Amino acid sequence: MKMRKKVSVLGCTGSIGKATLDVIRHLPQKFQVFALAVRSNIDLLEEQIKEFRPEFAVVFDPDSAIVLQKRLPNTPILSGLDGLKAAAGHKDVDFVMLAMSGSIGLHPALAAIHAKKQIGLANKEILVMAGEMISGLAKQQGVELLPVDSEHSALFQCLRNEPLSSVRRLILTASGGPFRKKNAEELEKVSLEEALCHPNWSMGPKITVDSSTLLNKGLEMIEARWLFEVEPERIDVIVHPQSVIHSLVEYVDGSILAQLSKPNMVLPIQYALTYPERKPGLLAPFDFQACSQLTFEPPDKKRFLCLQLALDALKAGGSYPCALNAAGEILVERFLSGCISWIDIGRKLEKLMSSHRRSNMLSLDSILSVDCEMRELARQA
Ligand code: NDP
Ligand code: MG
């Protein structure tokens, strides 16, 4: 019998993590869970451990780890960064699904690359803050970073077997978020509840807010720059409110390839897991009648300032994307806790980015120091 792939799922209680477990449950002959990792949601983790029986689990928060270990004495429960690195770099793991949110995911990502694991990358913040280093290291180690973000999975599928020299543009699609039709005056007063209500996708809070400001699309352009090693000038974005076309590749001869499907993350997750094969999936056949209209419009970078700021950071390079990511994480955290308004996310980000001075980002230390400094500034902004 063919060996099953052993998968570590980092962030298994989140939206991507749960969908990853759905795919593993759907293809039990192909995959088995090796390790599971969360921050502190031990109730759901406990259920997942009982169902998937991993070799060990990780609870980042040490106090919660102790509580869970008491409940489950037969499953080793690790904690902290060392625990995350063990789940990502253990010699017996085959595939590491990086589905945590935020820049904390950088450390296990590095562990997985050093250990030459197959990697499914949902945790885009890692490539935004340290894209040059991560993609260089992955290449050096012969590790392929398999995209999980739906846009990048679409690009990856459309790029198969084509050299990058044939590509004119990578075109990422954006839904436009819940505020696509709001004018500048209305945007001054949008609420947290409205920002958390995405028209097409159900996701964790950080990425949902980023989708409402279009910062998410900017982060994704930076992610694409490093995943596919394409210069910023060849990465474009178009608003496509139905989220059926997940992205497109325009070739130099004018031909455009697109990937279409219902907006559901199980598809890109499964493609990363089964790559380079395809296996029967969880989606019902596509319903063309229900999706008879596919429309496009240019993004408005004035109303959605965060997109412009991310584009500027993409073009400026160096430490700018890392600074943008760190400041964005803190500003969204402050918005989620009710301390600042939605419109302030863009305004404060603009101020913070205009005061940032570019440095080259060659070492892990320089990346972590820009990250830390920018977080502090964003807390006070
Ligand atoms: P969620 O907020 O739903 O889930 C985050 C997960 O990460 C949870 O399991 C959480 O654990 C875990 N986590 C957070 N911090 C730590 C930590 N320090 N140590 C261990 N685990 C931690 O996020 P999403 O699933 O929405 O997003 C995950 C990533 O995927 C993000 O980078 C996002 O941008 C990206 N992505 C998401 C998409 C989506 O559809 N949701 C689409 C494309 C990309 P706990 O539950 O204990 O807090
Ligand atoms: Mg996406």
Image (cartoon, rainbow, N blue to C red):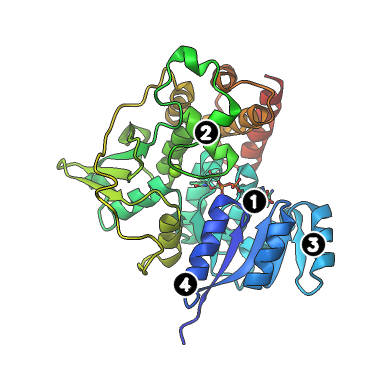
Label 4, ligand 1: CB separation under 8 Å: no
Q: Amino acid at mark 3?
A: Leu
Label 2, ligand 1: CB separation under 8 Å: yes
CA–CA distance in space, label 2 to label 1: 23 Å
CA–CA distance in space, label 2 to label 3: 32 Å
Q: Is residue 60 visible?
A: yes
Closer to viewer: mark 3 or mark 1:
3
> Of residues 46 and 316, which is closer to you in this image?
46
Q: Earlier in the sequence, mark 4 or mark 3?
A: 4
Tag shown at residue 107:
1
CA–CA distance in space, label 4 to label 3: 28 Å
- Which residue has dot 4 on it? 27
Residue most extreme to the bottom: 1
CA–CA distance in space, label 1 to label 4: 29 Å
Secondary element type, mark 1: helix
- Which residue has dot 2 on it? 210
* In this view, 288 is above or below 70: above
The residue under the point 62% across, 54% down is 11
Q: Earlier in the sequence, mark 2 or mark 1?
A: 1
- Which residue has dot 3 on it? 68
Q: Amino acid at mark 2?
A: Asp
Secondary element type, mark 3: helix
CA–CA distance in space, label 3 to label 1: 23 Å
